[in-house]
Image: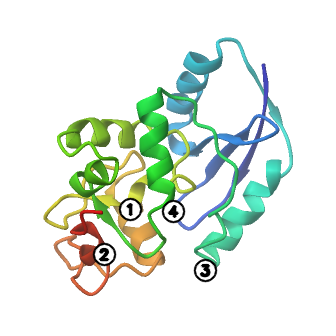
Amino acid sequence: MKLLIDSVASPIGDILVVADGTALVALEFAAVEGRMRRALRARYGGLELVPARDPLGACSRLRAYFAGDIRALDDVPADGGGTPFQRRVWSALRRIPAGTTMSYGALARRLRMPTATRAVGHANGQNPISIVVPCHRVIGSDGTLTGYGGGLDRKRWLLEHEGVRLSRKGRTSPARGARESRRSD
């Protein structure tokens, strides 16, 4: 299997972009390239990463996102593989609008699985296409920032970049993100 790879410099570190020709299959910070490669091998078995310039235009869209067009990634084709449950969670993540947040519990309720909060959190953490599949928009039920594979500093940066106001304690303010996180759908 041949996959296309490129990288993008960003304010929060270099980002690796991997596509199969029709969709993104991975988007990860270069600092954890090994983790990304292991996940790709687990999904595809033998594979070759072939350098390509701006596969699917995703690198250009990432640059636009980091330049302030926070909706530039909304319709980038993405296929993270995964189980049917993971795909449901990842699809729901793409429906959380930029500039808002949602709690794990609210996301579970949106999926009509109100007791699956932990499973939703685990699927969120397995997302192989960060930023495009915006797992950074999911927060704790009390409005605090919780786990992010790229680190909480990057999660904080991404949320603030999208207009979510955070307190010094890392909680979303009632004026933006916390309102969304309490919605039960």
Mark 1 and 4 residues: CB-CB less than 8 Å, in contact? no
Give the class, few, some or many, for how many residues have Cα within 10 Å of label 4's Cα (few <14, many ≥20): some
Q: Amino acid at mark 1?
A: Arg
Q: Nearer the viewer, mark 4 or mark 2?
A: 2
Q: Is residue 41 above or below residue 86?
A: above
Which residue is at a point 61% across and 80% down the rendered structure image? Answer: 68
Furthest residue in direction bottom, as rendered: 175
Mark in the foreground, 3 or 4: 3
* Residue linked to disc 2: 177
User: What residue lies at 32% left-to-right and 54% top-to-bottom?
Assistant: 110
Question: In front of the other: label 1 or label 4?
Answer: 1
Disc on the earlier residue, 4 or 2: 4
**Residue at the image point whose x is 19% and y is 67% from the top:** 143
In the image, residue 101 above or below residue 28: below
Q: Which residue is mark 4?
A: 12
Quadrant of res 178: bottom left
Residue bearing mark 3: 68
Label 1 belongs to which residue?
137
User: Given the current orientation, which residue lies at the most extreme left position?
Assistant: 142
Circles 1 and 3: CB distance less than 8 Å?
no
Amino acid type of disc 4? Ile
Residue 140 lies left or right of residue 68; in this view the side is left
Helix, strand or loop at label 1? It is: helix
